[in-house]
Image (cartoon, rainbow, N blue to C red):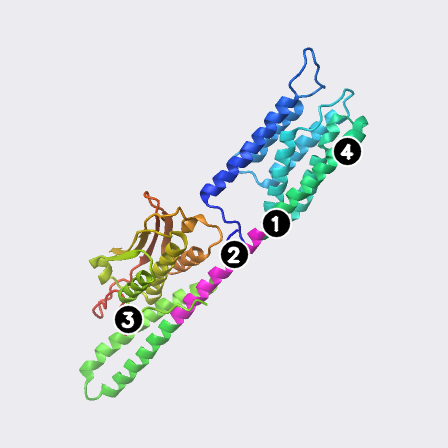
Amino acid sequence: MDEDGFPALSPRGRRTLAALITAWLLLMGLADIWSRMPLEYMRTLPAGAWLPVLSGVAMAVVVFAPVRVRIEGRAAVAAVLSLTVTGWLAWAPEDGPGSGTLESAVLLVLLARTARTARPWAALGLCLLLGATIVAGPARSGLRYVAHWSGFSSLLLLAAVAAAGFGCHLRMLDDRRARAIIAVREGERLQLAHDLHDFVAHHVTGMVVQAQAALAIREHAPEQVEPLLRGIEKAGNETLDSMHRLVRVLREQDRGTVRPDDLLAELALLISRFGQAGHPTVRLDVSAEARAAELDPEVETTVHRLVQEALTNITRHAPGARDARVGLTASPGTLTAEVVNGPPSQGAMPPGGRSGGFGLIGLRERIEVVGGTLTTGPTPDGGWQVTGTFPVRPQRPVTAAPGLGGSPA
C-alpha cells in the first residue's frame, strides 16, 4: 500500500501477482489429476471421476478467457456449469468423486472478482450464488455421505466468505480512489478558472485605461487614438478567447499556482532550486522557435506546472538519477515541453508505475483543458519521460509579438 492507502503495484508487480495466481491454479489442477491416478493395479475410480477436472478447466477458460464479456456473465455461466455437475454427481447411484480442487480455486478467484467489479445490483446475488456453488461442491461424493463431507463444506464456506470480503475491500479502495481522482480533477479545473479570471481582470483593466486615454487625447492628438483603439481591440479579442475557455472549464467541472511573469526565467529559477536541493543536474534546452512562440497565460502556467510536477516525480521515484533534461521546442501551432531523467540508481519505481499518485492525473486534466496532450513512459535506458504539447497563440498583425513568457498589456 502507498501513502494514500491504495494498492501500489508496478506493472512488474502485477505481472508477478498474475504469475503467482496462475502457478497456484496449475498446482490445484495437478493435485486434481494426481488424486485420481490409480495407486493400485486394477483399482477402479468412482463414476465421473474426471468430470470435476474437466469442469475446472472449462471454468478456468470461462473466467480468464481474454474476451469482452462482463464479469456478471462469467459468474453466471461458471455457477450454472458447476451446479449442473454437482447435481448430476450428487444424485448418481454410484459413489461420486467429490469436489475438484481446481474448480474450487477458480470459483474463489471468481467470487473475489465479482465482489470487486460487478455492478452493485448484481454483485450481491451473484456472490451468494457463487458461495452456494462452492459450498455445494463436496456433495458430489453423494448425498448419502453428507456426514462425511459437511465438515469440508464448512471450510469452503469460510474460504468463500474470506474471498468475498477481500473483493469488497478492494471495491472500497477502488471507490475511494475514484473519488480522489474526481476531486483532483475538479481542483485543477477550479484553479485554472481562477487563473483565467485573473487574466481577464488584467485585460479589462488595460482596456479601461486605454479607453480613458483615448478620450483624453482625442481633441489635441487624434492621430494617437487609432493605436489605442487597436490595443483595445486586441485585448478584447484575447479576453473573449479566455472567457470561452473559462466557460468550458466551469462546465466540465490548494495548490495556489500563479502565472509566471516570464516563463523561461521561472523555469530557470525552478531548475536552479531543484539542483541546489541536492538533486541531479538538470539541463534546460530551449529552441529558437520556442523562444519566439506566444502562449496564452493559462498555457504558460500549465507548462510551468508540467516541469514542476516532473521534477517532483524525479525526486520521489528516481533517487540517484544522474541527469535530467528539460526541453522546449516549437513547430507551427504547437509547443512541446519535455522532461527526461535517467534511470534511478536503486531501481525505484517510475512515476507511472504507481497506482496511488494523483499528480500526473491532475496534470493531464489541466493540459487537456487548455487544448494540449500529455504522454508519459519509460525511456530505453530505464529512465522516464514526461512530454506535453500545447497550442501556440496565433500571431496577430496589430502589434509585435512579445515572445514566450511576455505578458500582454
The mark found on residue 4 in the picture is 2
**Callout 3: 10 Å neighbours few (<14), some, many (20+)?**
some
Q: Nearer the viewer, residue 127 or 5?
A: 5
Question: Outermost residue toward the top?
Answer: 42
The mark found on residue 169 in the picture is 1
**Callout 2: 10 Å neighbours few (<14), some, many (20+)?**
some
Determine the CA span between mark 1 and mark 4: 29 Å
Which one is earlier in the sequence, the residue at label 3 or at label 2? 2
The magenta stretch spans residue 290 = no
* Mark 3 element type: loop
Which one is earlier in the sequence, the residue at label 3 or at label 4? 4
Amino acid type, residue under disc 2 in the picture: Asp
Using the rendered view, name the quadrant where residue 282 is placed.
Answer: bottom left
Q: Pointer 3: what residue?
A: 407
Which one is earlier in the sequence, the residue at label 4 or at label 2? 2
The magenta stretch spans residue 195 = yes
* Mark 1 element type: helix
* Mark 2 element type: loop
